[in-house]
């Protein structure tokens, strides 16, 4: 008790000396054992003010020249519930007394131990967890994120859905699982799924600005980082089980998973099992054929914990079969895709005692393959079909990734080595290709006291070697084989930003330059892609894509109102596009089964002899001058248990080379939600206004707007959580401008989703 008396004395003295400063003291106690807790983090959100408790659980937090009178004091430590204490008082001398924290093992909120997770955030950053994740959770990440500003859904049927961030898709934003790449081919084509099990996701972070370069060089659109319930930072004291089951009505989907944590002395085994099955999806005008899917995911992890960190080993086996809907421009009965991905990982985490430094070393090996089938042969296993050569196309990728990262309170520096082998099989004239990528990166923050401002900087330097192997064995139809050769790309990405707070306002601004080398498919493809009903032609002479971006944001926050306004602008002198080389208007009303010849027979923008009907449109890679700009406005009003939120967003893209808008830009969107929380219940009604999209890129068609209504009911009681989502409750006919089959079918109609989570 001597320490707390001493701190109290200091507290009284400093109340006179620092009359313009806040002086906050208290003691953190374990709720169950009533013992003090040391090394608890005490801090003010979105500032550099923070401290930790001593061995007796005591702390003192002095906020020098702190102008805000309304703020939260956050209290966090691994293994305990987080606590946020609201301050709205002119009194600058605050004694919290004893603060009791409850053990966190029953909630299992995943949080990776990384200092750069807690670096200063941008106003436009988005975190989806807890109640918000329950209200938005769907079976794919794009649909889960769809109710946020400037986020669209690229799709070829719901199962293939992928997010579009501010008009950026593919490789222009990063999608990671606990900071690591997914290792699939989802960013290379619209028919390739994201191999992410949403039932395993505990939270989603959308990260923008300088910090995004910690995850990769091509982060101009942002980083979508998912945190998983199986991460080794989650440690329990006794055997713990978590179950999750659910269903969706629009596709008769049913899914469930089990997470089992088994602690043995200093060790812990994690076992994750998941299964999901869906039928064809229904729309407002009927059933969409060949959109069924089945997903099975198994994951085993072992972690050994020490006093200053852990070492973790894990293995995951992800299997999925799904259908691509029919298209008269390709295959009348659709295409079936079978997928398998095996992931092995080793992670070492070490805390350096008596310092704020951390070391993370990780290695992963991802073995991915998928088959594209003309006829339904999914009653046999993927590997039986592959070894019997009974498929149209197979794409395989093996990825090795090694990473070393050092974190301190104000900075992060790292080294990454990535090696990939891409192997196509079947009728696909792309060479087997090896890629080797090495990079170094860093992030730092500095507080300029006299300006009351934080400066953020980051960089990533990379070198990519692309080496096609079996060029001489391929008879190219549209490429010059002499140009299909080894390529090297050097990349430099960097960013600088600032954050300034005054009274209840926060302002941040950042500039960024990114460089992205072309993918293997963008360089060397020459052949039909069955799943997209396209004949793809690469460009072996492509250079690095360069994008220059900036963002300016302003936020105001008090006890009742939270308001933010964000503007952004991005310019690229060399923007990659894989675009259709031409279009036959006369074929819009032509029936390929009529027995008549194609209206554009012989056209050079069509490959004759491919596809079920003997033709496929050609798509080629090119670089164009382009710009994208937009804004996001958010307004949130809080009063007791009631909350009303409104956001408005739009993005405009323009192709300066063609003097046309860029293709596949999100339409303008407005969202209004009313939320009420009482006792164990939460009620939410959400109205979505999706505007018409008449700013059309090359070969695009206009898309009408829609007004959608959703109702979400959530019941939480002890270890049980029940969520009911009623989506599109009035069964509106809604077309998604980013859907590649929007001219054939609308989006799903009315949907009822029920999920139940429980802990044992």
Image (cartoon, rainbow, N blue to C red):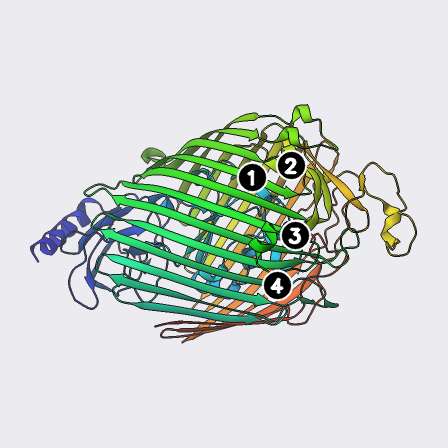
Residue 390: which disc? 3
Identify the residue at horizontal 71%, vertical 64% (top origin): 288
In the figure, residue 282 lies in which quadrant?
A: bottom right
Query: Which residue bears the numbered disc 4?
Result: 379
Residue underneath mark 2: 430
How crowded is the residue under tag 2: few (<14 C-alpha within 10 Å), some, or many (20+)? many
Comparing 83 with 561, the one in front is 83
Point 82% across, 43% down: residue: 583
Write down the quadrant of residue 75 in the picture: bottom left
Which mark sits nearer the N-terminus, 3 or 2? 3
Which residue has dot 1 on it?
422
Q: Position of residue 253 (x, y in %)?
A: 58, 69
On screen, residue 28 versus residue 141, left or right, reads: left
Q: In the picture, which quadrant includes the N terminus?
A: bottom left
Q: Mark 3 and mark 1: span between their CA atoms? A: 20 Å
- Going by the picture, which residue comes out furthest to the left? 2
Is 72 drawn above or below residue 222 in the view shown?
Answer: below
- Judged left or right of residue 245, residue 26 is left
């Amino acid at each position: 008790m001597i320490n707390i008396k001493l701190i109290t004395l200091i507290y009284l003295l400093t109340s006179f000396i620092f009359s313009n400063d806040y002086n906050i003291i208290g003691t953190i106690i374990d709720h169950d054992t009533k013992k003090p807790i040391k090394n608890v983090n005490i801090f003010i959100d979105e500032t550099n003010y923070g401290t930790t408790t001593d061995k007796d659980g005591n702390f003192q937090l002095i906020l020098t020249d702190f102008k805000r009178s309304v703020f939260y004091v956050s209290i966090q430590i691994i293994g305990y519930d987080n606590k946020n204490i609201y301050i709205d008082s002119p009194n600058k001398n605050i004694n919290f007394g004893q603060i009791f924290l409850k053990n966190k093992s029953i909630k299992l909120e995943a949080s990776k131990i990384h200092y750069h997770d807690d670096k200063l955030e941008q106003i436009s950053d988005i975190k989806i967890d807890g109640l918000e994740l329950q209200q938005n959770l769907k079976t794919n990440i794009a649909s889960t994120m769809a109710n946020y500003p400037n986020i669209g859904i690229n799709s070829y049927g719901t199962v293939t859905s992928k997010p579009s961030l501010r008009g950026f898709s593919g490789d222009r934003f990063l999608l990671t699982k606990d900071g690591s790449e997914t290792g699939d081919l989802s960013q290379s084509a619209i028919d390739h799924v994201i191999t992410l099990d949403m039932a395993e996701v505990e939270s989603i972070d959308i990260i923008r600005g300088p910090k995004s370069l910690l995850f990769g060089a091509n982060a101009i659109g942002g980083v979508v980082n998912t945190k998983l319930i199986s991460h080794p930072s989650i440690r329990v004291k006794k055997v713990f089980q978590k179950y999750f089951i659910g269903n969706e009505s629009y596709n008769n989907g049913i899914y469930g998973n089990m997470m089992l944590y088994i602690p043995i002395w200093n060790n812990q085994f994690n076992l994750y099992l998941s299964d999901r099955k869906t039928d064809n999806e229904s729309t407002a005008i009927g059933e969409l054929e060949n959109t069924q899917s089945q997903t099975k995911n198994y994951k085993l992890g072992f972690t050994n914990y020490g006093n200053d960190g852990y070492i973790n080993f894990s293995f995951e086996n992800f299997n999925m079969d799904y259908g691509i809907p029919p298209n008269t421009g390709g295959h009348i009965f659709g295409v079936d895709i079978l997928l398998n991905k095996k992931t092995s990982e080793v992670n070492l985490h070490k805390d350096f005692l008596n310092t704020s430094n951390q070391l993370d070393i990780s290695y992963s090996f991802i073995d991915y393959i998928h088959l594209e089938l003309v006829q339904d042969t999914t009653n046999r296993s993927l590997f039986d079909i592959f070894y019997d050569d009974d498929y149209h196309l197979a794409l395989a990728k093996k990825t090795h990734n090694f990473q070393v990262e050092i974190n301190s309170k104000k900075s992060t520096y790292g080294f990454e080595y990535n090696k990939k082998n891409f192997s196509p099989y079947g009728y696909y004239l792309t060479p087997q290709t090896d890629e080797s990528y090495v990079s170094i990166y860093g992030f730092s923050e500095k507080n300029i006291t006299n300006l009351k401002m934080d400066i953020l900087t980051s960089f990533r330097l990379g070198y990519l070697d692309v080496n096609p192997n079996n060029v001489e064995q391929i008879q190219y139809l549209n490429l010059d084989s002499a140009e299909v050769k080894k390529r090297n790309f050097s990349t430099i990405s960097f960013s600088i930003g600032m954050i300034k707070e005054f009274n209840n306002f926060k302002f941040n601004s950042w500039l960024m330059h990114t460089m992205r080398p072309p993918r293997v498919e963008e360089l060397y493809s020459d052949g039909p892609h069955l799943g997209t009903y396209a004949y793809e032609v690469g460009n072996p002479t492509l250079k690095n894509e360069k994008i220059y971006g900036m963002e300016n944001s302003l936020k105001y926050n008090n006890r009742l109102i939270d308001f933010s306004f964000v503007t952004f602008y991005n310019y690229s002198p060399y923007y990659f596009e894989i675009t259709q080389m031409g279009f036959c208007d006369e074929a819009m009303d032509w029936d390929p089964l009529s027995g008549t010849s194609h209206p554009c027979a012989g056209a050079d923008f069509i490959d004759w002899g491919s596809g079920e009907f003997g033709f496929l449109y050609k798509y080629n890679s090119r670089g164009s001058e382009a710009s994208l700009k937009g804004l996001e406005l958010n307004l949130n009003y809080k009063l007791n248990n009631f909350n009303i939120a409104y956001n408005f967003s739009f993005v405009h893209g323009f192709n300066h080379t063609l003097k046309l808008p860029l293709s596949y830009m999100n339409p303008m969107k407005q969202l209004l939600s009313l939320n009420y929380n009482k006792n164990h219940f939460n009620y939410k009604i959400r109205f979505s206004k999706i505007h018409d999209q008449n700013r059309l890129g090359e070969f695009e068609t206009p898309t009408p707007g829609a007004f959608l209504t959703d109702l979400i009911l959530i019941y939480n009681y002890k270890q049980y959580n029940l969520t009911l989502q009623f989506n599109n409750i009035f069964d509106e006919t809604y077309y998604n401008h980013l859907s590649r089959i929007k001219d054939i079918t609308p989006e799903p109609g009315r949907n009822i989703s029920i999920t139940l989570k429980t802990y044992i």
